[in-house]
Amino acid sequence: MGVRTPIARFLLSVLLIATCASSAGAQAVDTVGTRALGMGGAFVAVADDASAVYWNPAGLASGALASAVVDGGQLGMGGAGEVARQERRERRRGLLMALGTPPFGVGYYRLHDDVAWPAGPSGATGTGADGPSRRVTTLATDHFVATAVQSLADGVHLGASFKAVRGRVFSGDLGQPDGAVVADLWDEAREAAGGQTRFDIDAGLMVDRGTWRLGLVGRNLLAPAFAGRATATGPVRLGRQARVGVAVVAGDRLTLAADADLTTTDGVGERRRAAAGGAEYWASPTRRLAIRAGVRVQTVGALRTSASLGGSARLHGPAWVDVQATLGGRGADRGASASARIQF
């Protein structure tokens, strides 16, 4: 039987992505978005503000009439004042700025993945021209986004984010001068990396039935590759990613959500495949204060769990501030973020 509807063709394409994803250098989805991270990253079926240009482009169709968000945060070590010791160090940072309405959206986001660990065989410290060295890997991408949404039927929407992506990648050994901090080594690596610009597309599906929602998103569908100036293993490719989410809206004040990656990707420093669950609760009928909580589990490799807690407060009229903190058993799973949001 042939595939006869646009929805079926979209679902089939995402399932094909799930079975053939290529991924040297994919960046974690749950890096940016304070509301989303406060729910543990369970947001693909919730995305109803301007951050939908990142989390699920189709979410703009059933979200706020108009919204804007400025959002930033970090997972992993801060870097400042941290002496470059022998242990492995990781950091993920994200910045998002976006505007969204039901038919379209625009945005910019930046993702930085950084890892540093002892150079040399079997983890032994290597020696460079400046003394002891560390193996440093950094992948930084800047995404300039235009999002369009098409409604296929009542409560069924498709969206696409068309992106110009500027990528910089470095992987190699750097000398570790006395008193060096890890953050300085990562900055040095990015300066040495140069940069290239590629075109890419994300696509999303949202089915909104009022009391429940289903979301599906495919990211990096063109799998752009960036040739790092100092990367001996060749170009680093942003691997295709697929993620599914469901949400249950229990009245006007409680939303429960769950997400799961359909792909396993080789990120900077580790393989990633996550499942997440979270809740958003409005503490008053006037919706002036919200609290969120969530759990995220890495299901590939050693099982790893992190928990998030966050909230929102309305400052005046349509203006909001959002905050969240994430705690985990490993330093790379701990962090915080904040955002300012206007929503009508």
Image (cartoon, rainbow, N blue to C red):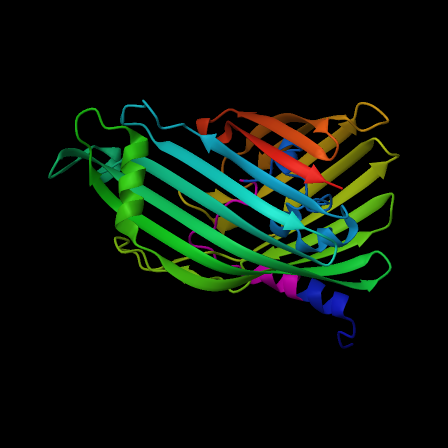
The reply to whether residue 120 is in sight is no
Closest to the observer, 309 or 71: 71
Q: Where is residue 325 drawn, in percent x and y?
A: 57, 25
- Can you say whether 309 is above or below 232 in the image? above
Q: Where is residue 187 drawn, in percent x and y?
A: 31, 39
Which quadrant is home to the C terminus? top right
Query: In the rendered structure, does residue 147 fall within the stretch colored magenta?
Result: no
Closest to the observer, 317 or 27: 317
Query: In the rendered structure, does residue 24 fall within the stretch colored magenta?
Result: yes
* Residue drawn at 36 percent across, 31 percent down: 89
- Can you say whether 19 is above or below 65 in the image? below
Q: Is residue 275 left or right of residue 62?
A: left
Span of residues in magenta: 13-31
Q: Where is residue 317 drawn, in percent x and y?
A: 75, 32
Closest to the observer, 195 or 244: 195
* Residue drawn at 77 percent across, 59 percent down: 157
- Can you say whether 158 is above or below 100 in the image? below
Q: Is residue 249 left or right of residue 26?
A: right
Count of labels shown? 0
* Residue drawn at 56 percent across, 45 percent down: 97
